[in-house]
Amino acid sequence: MNRLDEHLAAARKEVLDLDFTGPRAWKDAEAGRACIGFFPVYVPQELIWAAGALPVTVWGGGEGIEVEYADARIQSFICSISRSSLELGLTGRLAFLDGMLFSSLCDVARNLSGIWARNFPAKLCEYLHYPQNDKSDAALDYYLDDLRRLGGQLGAITGRTVTDERLGEALDLYARRRALLHELARVRNLEPWRLSLEEFQVLTRAAGLRDPRHHCQVLEEVLDDLPKRDAKKRDGVRVLLEGSFCEQPPMELLQVLDEAHCFVVDSDLSRGLRWCREALERSGDPWHDLAGAYFRHAEASVVRHKDPAERSKRLVERYQASHAEGVVFCTAKFCEPAFYDFVLHKRALEREGIPFMAVEFEEKMGSFESIRTQAETFAESILFFAEEAVA
Amino acid sequence: MSEPYKHQGVGQKIQKQLLGDWYQRLEEAPARGEKVAYLFISGNLGELLENFGFHLVYPEVNALQCGVKKVAGQNILAAEDLGYSGDVCGYVKNDIGLLSGGNKMPQGTTLPPPDLLVCNYAGCATYLRWFEALAEFYGAEMVVLDVPYLRGTQGPSPEEVRYVVRQLEELAETCTRITGKTLDRDKFRQALEFTQESEELWSQVLHSARRRPAPIDAYFEAVFFMAPIYTMRGTKGCLDYYRALALEVQERVDRGIGPVPEEKVRIVMEGPPAWPHFRKFWEMFKKWGVVSVASTYSKVGGIFDQGFRHDPDRPMESMAEYMLGCYTNRNWGMRSELIKEYMEDYRADALVIHSVKSCRSFSVGQADLREQFIRDFEIPTLFIESDLADPRYFAEAQMKNRIDAFFEALHHRKVTARV
């Protein structure tokens, strides 16, 4: 097995490992280390790292868990990531976490913070409210106060005060990791056959579970090895995937898209790990830079209110910049924010004459054959109409 | 022969008149060149917007009325035709469906388009998505009043209050830009005085259910009693309504009458009603002599019965505190605490949780409430599911079976306890 394959195999194993062996081992490696879990989409991971803890993304149980306890706590009309994340907690798999962070991304995630606090009273359970009024002069002040408060809470767990210096170093480290993840996405955009979507996803998701210094090294080696990879160029249509910013699609679904010749060349998969679309502006105050990044540098997302027209405009921009030929809305069942976004996006795409298709997924999907047929038909229709236009 | 009732039904007549006038003024507003603002019930800032001459539209109230008048189903289907999922909030879909059909309310009013969408984002993330859609469909300006969700048990922090106050001041500047008017401080004070007195009277009405028998049903009746204080607070008309309602309730107390012929079970209700099947839903409880003595849904627009009052001496601060303290803006622990307090304060026999698919803000966490009330507090608790807007989710036979089984068991428990 070559170095690239080894990295892919290791990342795949970690992403599917519901015992969280990697983060546990990281924590046990040195006294005084802590792990802080967070429910997607976004948290300021830099702050957690600066407090001496590893940020660990809790993406639910995927296909690898039988829900026994959480069904009684989460109604049937709620997304599967909420249910299986609670199941992970109730079955003790997250006992290694020293705390858990939730945020204002949707009503389910917000209320889950209360359920968590009740069921795991011995652990820190924090709720972060991300300002939704970016036009207010007060929003940045509020968020700064809140980050400092959270920094204090985290420092109390780890015994490591978040100093300006530590936070500044964390900002640099995470900026490096983000740049590498963006580079990986850029490489896949240029030559999607060189790295499958499933491989891209495991390398991205592993970032949410690993020591960022280690993962940066892995990503650098992957980026070095990719151009040398013996990969055969394949034909297909280039698509932008949207709607998977929180709960992640099953790996098999991503494989099905590749096999159906729908090459995903841009996406919001694991959006929280690639939250900022550009490098952070740095000043002498890292707290200010971290808070400001939320307002200034974040990619347009339905979980962060800005100008309502901004998101659809940005989707069209991304479609054009990635040279996509269609859009695939890939949404977790019961994900309200994505469903609301879909209607507005759909109108924008129709105005622009951009083809799209929509699929829904959940963690336990029996079959992907209907999605395969849908994706194949979508790809064929794009190719057919493109040929017709040329003729 | 006993003396005829003087006050029964008076409140309802006044409310009908108030709402009728309100809708008429709304319909006529565009022709008169008057501005219209859309906003939400939870943490609403009607007094502030009315100060600038805005007429107010509450899409939630329209959705509720469409539900009761049984047209929500067709509106929801119209929205689904536009691409809305079967799994999103029925209130939102009702509103979009209503809009796509020309904005004609079931009673005949044509709703005017908004000049300003004020998303008072208190306790519901769907509010943001809802008004983003309206901003797109109407091409209207949207302002967000960002209200942080409460943490801990101590209520709003000074930082949170300061943040909301600053946004209220910024909103006042936006209102000036749109209407050309400046905030009239004397009028604002007068409005908040009306508000304060209305809140006091409304609290007395709610507290009357502490009596045995309770003179009111604090859920099935209160959801109608609450309309003026949540939609036209700060007006003389609202105050007059609560004066009349207080007399009506007092008369019920004096005559020893209540919402059911014989009060047998006192319950606390958590969750919104099934509006499209309201009467049927209520009847399922009435037949067991059940009276709701307290409810959480009747507090969605403000928890005044716990002592909160708008303060004319601290207008913006108290408005911010009000917005932050709304029921759905309270965390799970605070909600649980409030329900427990109601159970004790109103000497209730059982808790009934009505979980609705549309409103995740209400429903996520209710299963843990059930678990806590049964296991930790040993309070009989019934958990039922349907929806507040979408008639498709009301499984009548199943609902009836669950309600019957619960109250039968409760009755049996009472009888055997006496032996």
Image (cartoon, coloured by chain):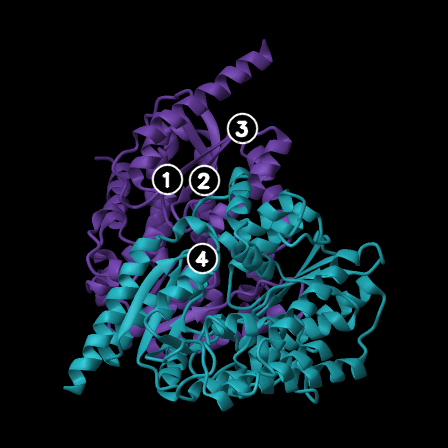
Chain colours: A purple, B cyan
- Chain identity of mark 3: A
Is residue A344 shown above or below B364?
above
Alpha carbon separation for disc pair 1 and 3: 24 Å
Q: Which label is found at residue B277?
A: 4
- Amino acid type at circle 3 is Pro
Determine crowd level at label 1: few under 14, some 14-19, many 20+ residues with C-alpha closer than 10 A: some
Q: Which label is found at residue B260?
A: none
Determine crowd level at label 2: few under 14, some 14-19, many 20+ residues with C-alpha closer than 10 A: many
Determine crowd level at label 3: few under 14, some 14-19, many 20+ residues with C-alpha closer than 10 A: some
Q: Quadrant of residue B184?
A: bottom right
Mark 4 element type:
helix
| Residue occupied by mark 2 | A185
Q: Return the residue found at the far front.
A: B1
- Amino acid type at circle 2 is Ala
Whether residue A43 appears in this view of the structure is: no
| Residue occupied by mark 1 | A200
- Amino acid type at circle 4 is His
Q: Relative to the observer, which residue lies in front, B92 or B32?
A: B32
The answer to which of marks 1 and 3 sits earlier in the sequence is 1
Dots 4 and 1: beta carbons under 8 Å? no
Determine crowd level at label 4: few under 14, some 14-19, many 20+ residues with C-alpha closer than 10 A: many
Q: Which label is found at residue A355?
A: 3
Left or right: B88 as drawn, with respect to B183: left
Alpha carbon separation for disc pair 2 and 1: 8 Å
Dots 2 and 1: beta carbons under 8 Å? yes
Q: Which of marks 2 and 3 is in front?
A: 3
Q: Position of residue B177 (x, y in %)?
A: 81, 64
Q: Position of residue A182 (x, y in %)?
A: 47, 44
Mark 2 element type:
helix
